[in-house]
Image: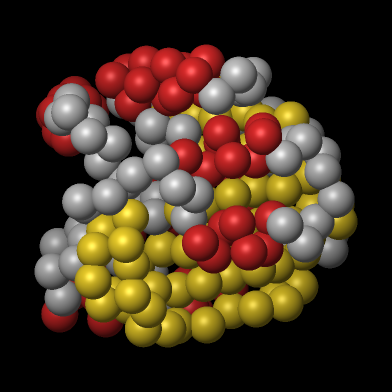
Amino acid sequence: MEDYQKTWNDRYGGSDFLFGKIPNEYFKSKLDTLTQGKLFLPGDGEGRNGVYASQNGWSVTSADFSEIAIKRAKEFASSCNVEINFIFSNLITEELQENKFDVLGISFLHFNGKNKGIVHRKLGRTLKIGGYVILECFSESQIKLNSGGPRKKDSLYNIQELKEYYSNFEFIELEDNKVTLKEGDAHIGDAYVVRMFARKETA
């Protein structure tokens, strides 16, 4: 786990924002349709989604496993005059408060096959009934491309496993798409992604 943490600290240690400062396009498009409330952003990195949401009236809790990312996100938020609750969190091993948030925003949060299920079921429980999850992650087809994402298939996503992780949700949108990304230097070019917009129906 220390090696994994070092990898991300190293990646976030460059001079530029790894994924840029502009919010994820899919996240933004869905968040803009919802009423402001409490938003949880696991794996928010340098804060691009959190800063945007906070600027638009959301109460934001942003979590990451990289101290470097959190440091840069705090500086970014301060420069934009917004307040965000930043927390250092290992989502695999740590418990998360349940039934707390109105919206869960997940942008390119990847774990290996075993840990994907652990983390996503845990994340789903952080939402109140009636809350929404907005997710965009690389799909299994992304293994063919070099525009970003893990190089191991079990760290990528398919629609069926998301249905299982979020089995108590109503799926408003759940698609495997080919899109063009322009998110800093790390996500650039044609990419295969899974996009999900879903509402929690039961505990």
Residue 166 seen anywhere in this rendered image of the structure: no
**Does residue 121 lie above or below 157 as drawn?**
above
Q: Is residue 23 left or right of residue 196?
A: left
Left or right: residue 58 versus residue 177 is right
Going 39% across and 35% down the picture, which residue do you hit? 45
Q: Quadrant of the N terminus?
A: top left
Please give the count of numbered marks on the rendered protein: 0
Percent of width and height locating residue 122: 58, 44
Residue 88 spot, x, y in % from top left: 45, 20
- Residue at the spot x=29%, y=20% of the render? 68
Vertical comparison of 177 with 71: above or below = below
Horizontal relation, residue 148 to residue 36: left or right: left
Q: Quadrant of residue 114?
A: bottom left
| Residue at x 49% of width, y 19% of height | 79
Q: Is residue 57 visible?
A: yes
- The one nearer the camera, 110 or 117, is 110
Residue at the spot 65% in from the left edge and 78% down from the top edge:
173
For this rendering, which residue is in front, 80 or 39?
A: 80
Residue 128 x %, y %:
82, 45
Picture coordinates of residue 167 (x, y %)? 67, 68
Query: Would residue 201 appear left or right of 144 to someone viewing this image?
Result: right
Colour convention: secondary structure
